[in-house]
């Protein structure tokens, strides 16, 4: 029998779950350490963060700074800024990882898979042939690079983007 070790997965399994009312997406930007929080880019009203439990390598989240639960809770400026962060995420991922495609989306509500009520968009890079038997049969995702290494790679690209302010 062959064994596949995904040691990083235990961190997720054993991580304490946010108590009702926990606000990780508002506390992480306030840490003052973007590398520790895995924040890739900040704009005036939202930010990009590397997903700690990604579907694919480079999986980013676009998150408004203000704590809102639904798209309709955003004002016009926040909507435009969040969409711009999604576009910046796509540019960063394209330059750094050269994916063939992207999945972008929101999980609005628990039944849709929204585990954190703070609104956030998923930007998931995809490659031709990136789907295989591992998630289906092995219940395991294979990620080719650590989160720290991926953070450094994406942050370097984000830092090189011309300022659009």
Image (spheres, rainbow, N blue to C red):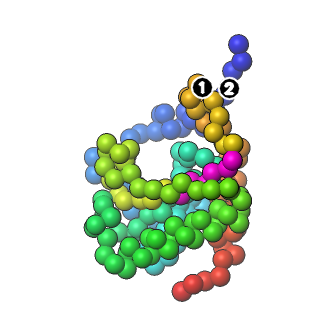
**What stretch of residues is rendered in magenta?**
123-128
Marks 1 and 2 close (CB-CB < 8 Å): yes
Q: Is residue 27 above or below residue 139?
A: below
Which mark identifies residue 4?
A: 2
Say which of 47 and 107 sits in front: 107
Q: Residue furthest bottom?
A: 165
Q: Is residue 78 above or below residue 136?
A: below
Task: Provide residue 40's location: percent of width, then percent of height.
Answer: 58, 65
Q: Is residue 34 above or below residue 163?
A: above
Quadrant of image for the C terminus = bottom right
Q: Mark 1 sits on what residue?
A: 138
Q: Residue at x 28, y 51 (%)?
A: 21
Q: Residue at x 46, y 71 (%)?
A: 83
Quadrant of image for the N terminus = top right
The answer to whether residue 8 is left or right of residue 111 is right
Marked residue nearer the N-terminal end (1 or 2): 2
Q: Secondary structure at mark 1?
A: helix
The answer to whether residue 65 is left or right of residue 97 is left
Magenta-colored segment: predominant secondary structure: strand
- State which quadrant residue 155 falls in: bottom right
The answer to whether residue 86 is left or right of residue 158 is left
Q: Secondary structure at mark 2?
A: loop
Task: Provide residue 115's location: percent of width, then percent of height.
Answer: 37, 46
Q: Residues within 10 Å of mark 1 (few under 14, many from 20)?
A: few
On whether residue 124 falls in the magenta region, the answer is: yes
Q: Residue furthest top?
A: 1
Q: Residue at x 54, y 37 (%)?
A: 11
Task: Provide residue 42's location: percent of width, then percent of height.
Answer: 52, 72
On whether residue 129 falls in the magenta region, the answer is: no
């Amino acid at each position: 029998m062959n064994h596949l070790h995904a040691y990083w997965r235990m961190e997720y399994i054993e991580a304490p779950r946010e108590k009702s009312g926990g606000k990780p997406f508002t506390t992480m930007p306030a840490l003052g350490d973007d590398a520790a929080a895995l924040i890739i880019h900040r704009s005036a009203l939202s930010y990009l963060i590397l997903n700690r439990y990604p579907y694919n390598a480079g999986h980013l989240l676009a998150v408004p700074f203000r704590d809102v639960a639904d798209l309709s809770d955003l004002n016009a400026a926040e909507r435009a800024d969040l969409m711009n962060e999604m576009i910046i995420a796509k540019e960063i991922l394209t330059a750094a990882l050269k994916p063939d495609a992207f999945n972008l989306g929101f999980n609005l509500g628990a039944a849709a898979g929204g585990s954190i009520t703070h609104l956030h968009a998923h930007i998931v890079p995809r490659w031709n042939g990136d789907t295989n038997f591992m998630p289906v049969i092995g219940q395991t995702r294979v990620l080719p690079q650590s989160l720290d290494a991926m953070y450094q790679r994406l942050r370097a690209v984000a830092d090189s983007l011309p300022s659009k302010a």
